[in-house]
Structure formats: C-alpha cells, structure tokens
Image (cartoon, helix red, strand yellow):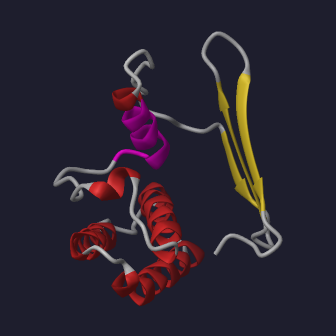
Amino acid sequence: MGTRDNNEFKDAIRDIAVHAPNLANPYDRVRCSEWARKLASIPDDKIEFSKLRNEYAQFLRIQVRNNFLHGPFMIPPPDTNLCPLAECLGNMMAQKIPYLPRTGPIAPMLHHRSPDGRAFVSAKQIPGGGVFCYMAVSPEGFD
C-alpha cells in the first residue's frame, strides 16, 4: 500500500538477513528466519497490515543487530494472524507477572513519526480518563 512502509520493511528484512548469521544459537537463527518468513507473508494491501509487520520487523531488527532474541521471537511465530506488538508484549508481561491484567486490542488514538525520522510519538486514551503517551527521540533516526 504505502511505498514508504514497504521500503521500511524491505530495509529491515535486509538488515535482519545481514545480522542473523551472527546469532550464536543456531535455534535463534532458525526462529529468526521463521519470523522473517511470517512477516513477509503478511499482505501489504492495507495500511494496518503494513504497520503491523513493520512494528515486528523493526523490533526483530533491533534484537538481531544486538545478537540476541527476546520476547515474542523466543518461540516460533503463530500460524494465526499476529496481534499488535504492544498487545503481544503486554500479554507476555501479564504471563510473567500474574497480578497484571491481560491487555485487549490496543488502538492508539495518535501515532506519528516526524518527517526526518528522528522522533516518534504515540498516545492512547486510558479507560476512565487520562492519556498514556509514548515519545522517542534519536539523533540518528529510527531506521
């Protein structure tokens, strides 16, 4: 759908392919490959799907660049559709910390990246009042 989203995904997959052989554990390399295949199989005909696969691809890219896998990438990808990354990570934390509630579908009310790629902001309304805001800034930008 969006050329920028597709280019971002292709760049991430290329970077993952370059750094994946550096993973020390052969099982991690296999899982990395399985996740890359799963992400590549997600259709890009809708913006929601493109953003979903880019979230996972960028998270995997960061981990592979640092020679480790963590979180959802510690197990093979599911055969079903992926839930949003924030929901997946929230549920993983809830499994580790029993008194945390499981998260349901998460839909940010604001999601924006600066034109130069150096800043990112996302805001979500908190039920019962309030707003949760996440902002990240990097001098090198978010590739």
- Left or right: 11 as drawn, with respect to 114: left
Residue at the extreme front: 24
Q: Position of residue 1 (x, y in %)?
A: 48, 71
Q: Position of residue 126 (x, y in %)?
A: 64, 21
Nearest the camera: 40 or 74?
74
- State how many labels appear: 0
Nearest the camera: 74 or 111?
74
- Left or right: 102 as drawn, with respect to 61: left
Screen quadrant of the C terminus:
bottom right
Residue at image point 41% right, 25% down: 97
Using the image, determine if residue 88 lies above or below residue 27. Answer: above
Residue at the extreme left: 79
Residue at image point 53% right, 68% down: 62
Q: Position of residue 44 (x, y in %)?
A: 39, 69
Tell me, yes or no, whether the highlighted magenta stretch contains residue 45.
no
Q: Position of residue 58 (x, y in %)?
A: 51, 67
Tell me, yes or no, whether the highlighted magenta stretch contains residue 87.
yes
Q: Which residues are magenta?
A: 83-93
When asked about the image quadrant of residue 5, the answer is bottom right
Residue at image point 45% right, 56% down: 52
Nearest the camera: 97 or 79?
97
Q: Main secondary structure of the magenta part?
A: helix
When asked about the image quadrant of residue 24, the answer is bottom left
Residue at image point 48% right, 72% down: 61
When asked about the image quadrant of residue 38, the answer is bottom left
Using the image, determine if residue 138 lies above or below residue 93. Answer: below
- Left or right: 60 as drawn, with respect to 110: left
Nearest the camera: 86 or 92?
92
Using the image, determine if residue 140 lies above or below residue 88. Answer: below
